[in-house]
Image (cartoon, rainbow, N blue to C red):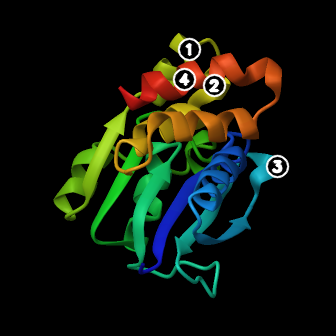
Amino acid sequence: METKNIMIVGVGGQGSLLASKLLGRLLLTKGYDIKVSEVHGMSQRGGSVVTYVRYGDKVYSPVIDKGEADFIVSFELLEAARWLEFLKPGGKIVTNTQQINPMPVITGAATYPENLVQKMKDAGADVEAFDALSVAEEAGSPKAVNIALMGRLSKFFDFTEEEWLQAIRDSVPAKHIALNEKAFQLGRR
């Protein structure tokens, strides 16, 4: 199988590392060679965070170059637009519609761009945008945005729902399993 590439992008503290761990665990159970690379940026300060997940028969490097991502999973709308050039032709963006103001917007030096979903579509991207924050809150916690996004991503894979749920059970503390399973199932719908 040719190597597939998934970028998980967001803002520090949103749970992208757990999302990549869950995805990696699932892919390993399916027998793929997998490489995960975390680029934290200013993750401790709410800055941009990106994680690369690559899988296939044999993966030699964890890095995804521009134009190579089969999927970009974005926890925040501006982050999806920021990493758009990494999406390959025919790739897909799965993004939360939540907007988190970056520092230039907070200080008044810039304004948050409008109509980002439409702009990405106009640039040729296949975009699946939904309010993952509301889904997570419906599941019981705004912190479950990451798992709601994994639920939506799961629609584009041939793995069963039970295989995804088992990866959740193997990746989160026992006291958070029910919440995360619900967030996943709501996101998948």
Amino acid under disc 4: Ala
Kindly report the distance in space between the C-alpha atoms of the residues bearing marks 3 and 4: 25 Å
Q: Residue at x 62, y 27 (%)?
A: 144
Give the mark nearest the N terminus, 1 or 2. 1
Q: Residue at x 59, y 65 (%)?
A: 31
Image coordinates of residue 169 in percent, x first then y, are 70, 32
Image coordinates of residue 58 in percent, x first then y, are 57, 83
Mark in front: 3 vs 4: 4
Q: Residue at x 44, y 21 (%)?
A: 186
Amino acid under disc 1: Ala
Dividing the image into 4 quarters, which one contains the C terminus? top left
Dividing the image into 4 quarters, which one contains the N terminus? bottom left
Q: Nearer the viewer, residue 41 or 159?
A: 159
- Asked whether the residues under the numbered discs 2 and 4 touch, taking CB atoms below 8 Å apart as contact, a structural biologist would say yes
Amino acid under disc 2: Asn
Q: Which residue is mark 4?
A: 183
Q: Which residue is mark 2?
A: 180
Kindly report the distance in space between the C-alpha atoms of the residues bearing marks 3 and 2: 24 Å
- Asked whether the residues under the numbered discs 4 and 1 touch, taking CB atoms below 8 Å apart as contact, a structural biologist would say yes
Query: Does residue 100 appear anywhere in the picture?
Result: no
Checking the image for residue 139, the label placed there is 1
- Asked whether the residues under the numbered discs 3 and 2 touch, taking CB atoms below 8 Å apart as contact, a structural biologist would say no
Give the mark nearest the N terminus, 1 or 3. 3
Query: Does residue 29 appear anywhere in the picture?
Result: yes
Q: Residue furthest bottom?
A: 60
Mark in front: 1 vs 3: 1
Checking the image for residue 22, the label placed there is none
Give the mark nearest the N terminus, 4 or 1. 1
